[in-house]
């Protein structure tokens, strides 16, 4: 039975490095026993960074993905995909070797800020999501709706929620609780993973009696601790992608 990768980023999105042991190293990538690298999923891009060996040799990681079995199902292991021209470094990695896994934290922080901002946008729009893409350069969210959206109004709403400095808290609900509250699932295209008995959630606001709950939904992505950490963000584009889809694009304000 394959040993699953311990996902350290699930409990601490600010952890930028960890000591790990190589489980496997192939041209497709490197599997570690634990990692701070977030794999592509839930619309969020995979992390980049480095794996540093005991002799100081470095493997540059260009992407992070979830490993899949031959039947297409996830194995529970995470693959650190090497950047081009990394054959020598890849060959030096052997199962059992100790390495330091270090992410590009400046890039991760942009992903965290955009991902949290996308939750705020979901609150402001108030419609189901049928697709999203969270990158280090922009966030794109597709809403299932027919009504027009106002770019300036949404940008102003985001600014107010950012300024409110609301707490962003990682939690969980049981499968049964999620079944009893299907409205918590905002995405039409991706269902939260089940099977462990609990589903990870992100809650924004609602930490105190007078603190309004802004958002609560299942999410496995990485987020900032408070909305103030998002910084200045604006709606840069709104597109009508189909008769029932409105695409909203977010960007940071320089």
Image: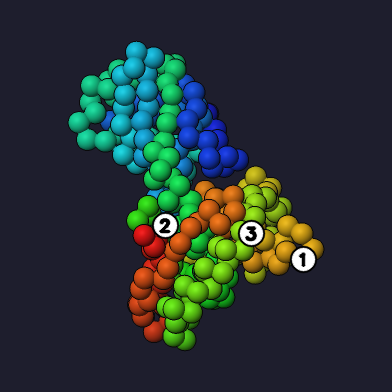
**Gap between marks 2 and 3 measured at Cα:** 21 Å
Cα separation, mark 2 vs mark 1, equals: 31 Å
Q: Which residue is mark 2?
A: 134
Question: Which label sits on residue 84?
Answer: none
Label 2: which secondary element: strand
- Say which mark, if any, is on residue 210: 1
Can residue 194 be seen here? The reply is: no
Q: Mark 2 or 1 closer to N-term?
A: 2
Pinpoint residue 141: horizontal percent, then vertical percent. 43, 67
Depth order, front residue of 211/247: 211
Furthest toward the bottom, the residue is: 147
Residue 68: quadrant of the picture: top left
Residue with the mark numbered 3? 166
Q: Nearer the viewer, mark 2 or mark 1?
A: 1
Q: Position of residue 86 (x, y in %)?
A: 24, 28
* SS state under label 3: loop
């Amino acid at each position: 039975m394959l040993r699953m990768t311990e996902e350290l980023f699930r409990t601490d999105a600010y952890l930028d490095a960890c000591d790990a042991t190589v489980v496997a190293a192939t041209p497709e990538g490197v599997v570690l026993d634990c990692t701070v690298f977030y794999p592509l999923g839930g619309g969020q891009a995979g992390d980049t960074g480095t794996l540093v060996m005991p002799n100081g040799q470095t493997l540059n990681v260009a992407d992070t993905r979830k490993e899949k079995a031959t039947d297409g199902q996830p194995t529970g292991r995470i693959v650190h995909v090497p950047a081009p021209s990394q054959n020598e470094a890849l060959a030096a990695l052997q199962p059992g070797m100790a390495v330091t896994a270090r992410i590009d934290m400046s890039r991760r922080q942009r992903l965290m800020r955009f991902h949290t901002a996308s939750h705020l946008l979901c609150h402001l729009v108030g419609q189901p999501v049928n697709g999203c893409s969270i990158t280090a350069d922009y966030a794109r969210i597709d809403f299932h709706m027919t009504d027009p959206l106002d770019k300036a109004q949404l940008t102003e709403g985001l600014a107010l929620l950012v300024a409110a400095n609301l707490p962003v808290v990682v939690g969980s609900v049981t499968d049964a609780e999620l079944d009893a509250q299907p409205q918590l699932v905002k995405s039409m295209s991706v269902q939260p993973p089940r099977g462990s008995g609990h589903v990870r959630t992100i809650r924004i606001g609602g930490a105190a009696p007078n603190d309004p709950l802004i958002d609560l939904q299942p999410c496995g992505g990485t987020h900032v601790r408070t909305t103030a950490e998002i910084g200045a963000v604006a709606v840069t584009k709104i597109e009508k992608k189909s008769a029932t889809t409105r695409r909203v694009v977010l960007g940071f304000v320089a």
